[in-house]
Image (cartoon, rainbow, N blue to C red):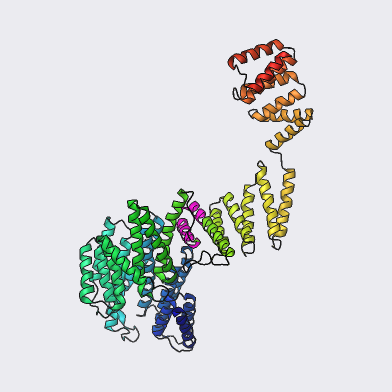
Amino acid sequence: MRTLTLLISVVLTLAFACQAAPPTPYDADFVKTLREMRLYRLGESYIAEKLTADDLSDNASSELTSVMIELLGEESLCLPSDKQGETVDKAKRFAEEYLKAHSGSPFRIRVLIALALNDLNAGELGAMNVQLFPGDEPTRQTALTRLRQADDQIRELTRIFASPSNAQDPKTKQKVFSDEHWQRLKNQTAFFSARRALAMAKCYPENSPEYSDCVIQANAELKTLGSIPSTEPLCWQARLLRVRAERMSGDVQAAQNALSFMLEEQKPPIEMLLDFQAEKLYVLMSSDRSAAVKILSELEQSLSGSFSNADTSDDAAHLAVLDAFVTFEKESAARGDKNEQKKWQDKATQWAGKMRLYDSGFYARSAQQVLAALAIKKLDEESSDENAANTQAPSTIVLAAENLFREGQFQKAIDAYVKAATREKELLSLNQDDGGGSGNSPTTPAPSEENVFNYRYVAAAIAHKLNDHVQAADLFRQAALGAPKNPKAAQAFKTALFHAGKLVDVNKPETIERYSVMLDEFLKTFPDSPDVNLIRQQKQRLSEAIKTAPKTPAQRLLEAQTALKENRSEEALTLFKQLAKEFPNTQDIQIGFAEALSAANADQDALNQWRKVALNVKQYSPEWYRAKYEVASLLVKTGQKDKAVEMVRLLKLLRPDLGGAEWSEKFEKLLLK
């Protein structure tokens, strides 16, 4: 109800604000509210309209541009990784346009700070992903890239702050920033630099020189901060960062003492208490597990009702609780305690699901990455246990699939997308059976046919990227036939036909048959497609190609066997004679040639051919006994019974059972003739 009221208030305010004249600091506060509610498009259109004003001052232009950059930066964090680039580039274009038009303006520091903040947030998120996905080098390099970009912006800001004259308007030589405000911005930049250094440290192993150097750099940057009044949030944020730096440097006791002193003696502002409680949880996780579990329980209980209230003040505490769940889950796994591990894993999954839905920017994206890591782990468990039930939410499985794709594990990504589609289909069936109530929760969107199609389509697209014609043809076909009314369905099926066409082999009739069936499926499923005539033409060309194509060895053998079966002896002999010449080592052909010679009463040639068969088939196999029997029969037929008797007696010495009752009886009857 609170969110709805706030939304109505924002929209009404927007209606009046659009009539207002020059921008004021109100714009930043207003857009911040839109950001908290994830109304990014509304905020972007609002600022874009403001930026078109003809009488826009340099001051107002810098403020609006920096607000736009921060809004786009936060929006990018909430997008899938493959869609972030466009939004990040858009923010950079706004910055470049302002900096080009106001190259000497002191107000440009606002834009540089906004750019640095975007890269810093993305880099910190990337650093967290490095810890969630150890060994994922692409993720590490992406995080390092964004943190280095932030460093470039911070260095430029440091250079500007080094000269007080940069606070003056170059035309009027009047200060546009007071000394107090200038120092505040300078402190903020140093604070960003310390944050960047600590995030950089997380991209390296804890015992490495790089890790230590980054933590030392963070401490050095924090010492450069000027005097900050305790009434300013930055004062307490910096104090918290000092505690974090001490914790990361290994001095947990110093961090704990500093926290106790600040909480008990200095009394931080009430809006910062949750942040201090969150940092206390991190410190205790490094030093006192039982105390950490206790404070975690308290935080979990006090924060459990804080979701969905459009208030970002508790987002950092939400993340600390989630990190604790993940840490304890890993500890339980290392001990081999399956029950304890499942308890923490379930808590982490549920908490991250709420954060992803309700928290803002960096924190929502952090939760999303935790969900992905947990989902990958669960998918691995399911793949090793055939009886494991697939109970994950499809959207969570998709997060895992996205990360697997980013890590280059393409086949696992395909399997995950297919599993997501299967799970989505199951939930959709349950919803239809009970009128739409099954499987849904506040953190699980209602299943849809469109999602089923999209998950299969992405899996197919990965197979397409890999040039895996078999998988791509099958997955594109499944996607299209599963949702024929989807706007992309016909195109998906066309892509399936493309891959199936690549598999057509004149030597493999089954590939031709499959392709022909798929052509018929397209014509039946998409009769209104503009490609119908093209598909009909393709089917006609396929039929003509089949008629004119040279017969395969398998087809020729079948033709010869049919002629022999139908007592067309001369035709069968001609066909087998040519095949035997071309394929001297093919057993079925050589036996068929011997049968054709016998059927044509070419006794001497048949005798020689059966002897050849007996030499080339496996000894004492059914084919070998048959060849021996045929040789003996032809010896009898050509008046050489003595040789036949001698051959059978020798065979009986080697194999007294003569190959079993069937062959023994045949040989005995032959000798009685």
The quarter holding residue 403 reads bottom left
Residue 583 visible to an observer of this rendering: no
Quadrant for the C terminus in the image: top right
Relative vertical location of residue 407 with respect to residue 174 in this rendering, above or below:
above
Q: Is residue 313 left or right of residue 493?
A: left
Who is closer to the viewer here, 576 or 259?
259
Image point (74%, 35%), residue name: 559
Who is closer to the viewer here, 229 or 517?
517
Image point (46%, 79%), residue name: 1
Magenta residue check for 53: no
* Residue 437 percent across, percent down from the top left: 54, 67
The quarter holding residue 647 reads top right
* Residue 436 percent across, percent down from the top left: 56, 67
Q: Is residue 113 left or right of residue 39?
A: left
* Residue 174 percent across, percent down from the top left: 31, 86
Residue 1 visible to an observer of this rendering: yes
Relative vertical location of residue 509 with respect to residue 656 in this rendering, above or below:
below
Seen from this angle, which residue lies furthest front? 434
Relative vertical location of residue 132 with respect to residue 556 in this rendering, above or below:
below
Magenta span: chief secondary structure:
helix
Relative vertical location of residue 151 with respect to residue 458 in this rendering, above or below:
below
The quarter holding residue 219 reads bottom left
* Residue 6 percent across, percent down from the top left: 45, 81
Q: Which residues are magenta?
A: 394-416
Who is closer to the viewer here, 500 or 163?
500
